[in-house]
Image: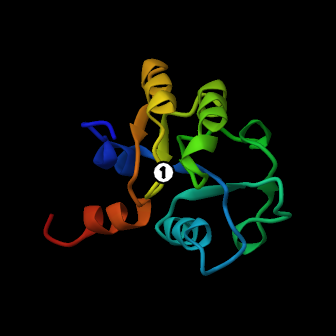
Amino acid sequence: MNDYQPIEKILAETKTIAVVGQSSNAAKAGHYVPAYLKEQGYRIFAVNPYLSEGLDGDTAYGSLADVPRPVDLVLIFQRSENVPPFVDQAIDIGAKAVWMQLGITNAVAAQKALAAGLDVVQDACMLVEHKAWVKPGR
């Protein structure tokens, strides 16, 4: 894991999130994390070639390149070994940051994203980090 993770910067500056591996199963983190983030005001784009729709009937996209608007953050729910092509796509679409969800790390992909100027978070739950970030009195 990288030493510096710009969690607060990403949470403060992000408006649009492409969720790679979003799930239709409400019991999976790939569903309830983006659902929570949408409730917090982030614009969510589901990226999963096996979904016909995302949250609340929104369109789901087969790849990051298919998302019709620029995205600030690519949030990844994939096995660590499957991360590199999604980081490549995040770079290609001009995302500002990549976030690998809790339990997901890939040092090579993270280094590539950093070298391309993206902020990177690994092995952290965006829901947990957001709740800590917005807690009263911080």
Structural crowding at the residue carrying mark 1, measured as other residues with C-alpha within 10 Å and reported as few (<14), some (14–19) or many (≥20) = many
Point out residue 109 in the picture as x, y percentages from the top left corner: 52, 31
Answer above or below: position of 21 versus 69: below
How many numbered markers are drawn? 1
Farthest left residue in view: 137
Answer above or below: position of 65 versus 43: above
Farthest top residue in view: 115
Is 128 positioned to the left or the right of 25 in the image? Answer: left
Location of the N terminus by quadrant is top left
Farthest front residue in view: 81
Point out residue 96 in the picture as x, y percentages from the top left corner: 49, 33
Q: How is the image coloured?
A: rainbow
User: At x 33% / y 61%, what residue is drawn?
Assistant: 129
Answer above or below: position of 134 versus 3: below
Is 122 positioned to the left or the right of 138 in the image? Answer: right
The residue that disc 1 covers is: 104
Tell me the element at label 1.
loop
Which one is in front, 68 or 111? 111
Point out residue 128 in the picture as x, y percentages from the top left corner: 36, 67
User: At x 67% / y 56%, what residue is drawn?
Assistant: 21
Location of the C terminus by quadrant is bottom left
User: At x 81% / y 48%, what residue is drawn?
Assistant: 62
Answer above or below: position of 52 versus 136: above
Is 54 positioned to the left or the right of 137 in the image? Answer: right
User: At x 80% / y 41%, what residue is drawn?
Assistant: 66
Is 67 positioned to the left or the right of 33 in the image? Answer: right
Q: What's the residue type where badge 1 is placed?
A: Ile
Point out residue 2 in the picture as x, y percentages from the top left corner: 31, 36
